[in-house]
Image (cartoon, rainbow, N blue to C red):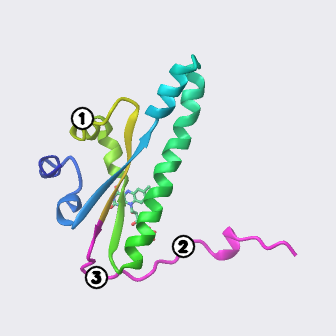
Amino acid sequence: MGKLAEQGQFQTIMLEVGHFFIFCSDVKRHADFAQQEGDSSTSLAGCGDGCAIDATLVSQNRVIAVESMGLGSCYIGGIRDRIETIADLLQLPEHVYPVYGLSVGHPAHRNPVKSHFYSSAIYHHNH
Ligand SMILES: Cc1cc2nc3c(=O)[nH]c(=O)nc-3n(C[C@H](O)[C@H](O)[C@H](O)COP(=O)(O)O)c2cc1C
């Protein structure tokens, strides 16, 4: 991983942080099951989203956990630019692929909370 970052293929944040996690979508179990059941590849494609959502839920729980401990984190979606490289590096089985990276470490400083959407744009209250 370090070599790839040094070559400029990934952000150097991956080298500078205390921990770098890679969350993977595991379609392999579904693929094995579909093959066992003689299922079509259509249902396999459908569960790809679900597996990526699983990985997302796990990563978000990790963010909440580390931030509650006073650590900082940053998702690195940039690893998706090199999915095959990462899969080779981690020797992932077929049908398992990286979804996000997550940098975790002691923050050098805390950024102020940014303003996002107005709450009226994202929240509706039924009267
Ligand atoms: C799916 C996803 C992928 C991201 N990928 C990167 C990335 O590759 N590099 C990076 O510096 N930040 C990445 N971020 C972090 C965002 O740039 C941003 O800092 C973070 O979502 C916090 O949002 P906010 O600053 O608007 O509150 C990513 C965030 C998400 C949700």
Look at the image and tell me in which quarter the C terminus lies: bottom right
Task: Give neighbour class at mark 1: few <14, some 14-19, many 20+ (Cα, 10 Å).
Answer: few
Comparing 10 with 1, the one in front is 1
Mark with earlier residue (2, 1):
1
Find the magenta span and give its range: 104-127
Q: Secondary structure at mark 2?
A: loop
Which residue lies under the disc numbered 2? 116
Q: Position of residue 48 (x, y in %)?
A: 52, 36
Which residue lies under the disc numbered 3? 109
Q: Amino acid at mark 1?
A: Asp
At x 14%, y 52%, the residue is 2
Q: Position of residue 116 (x, y in %)?
A: 54, 73
Which residue lies under the disc numbered 1? 88
**Is 19 positioned to the left or the right of 62 in the image?**
left
At x 51%, y 32%, the residue is 30
Picture quarter containing residue 70?
bottom left
Looking at mark 3, is its residue's CB closer than 8 Å to ligand 1?
no
Q: Position of residue 81 (x, y in %)?
A: 32, 42
Looking at mark 1, is its residue's CB closer than 8 Å to ligand 1?
no
At x 48%, y 27%, the residue is 31
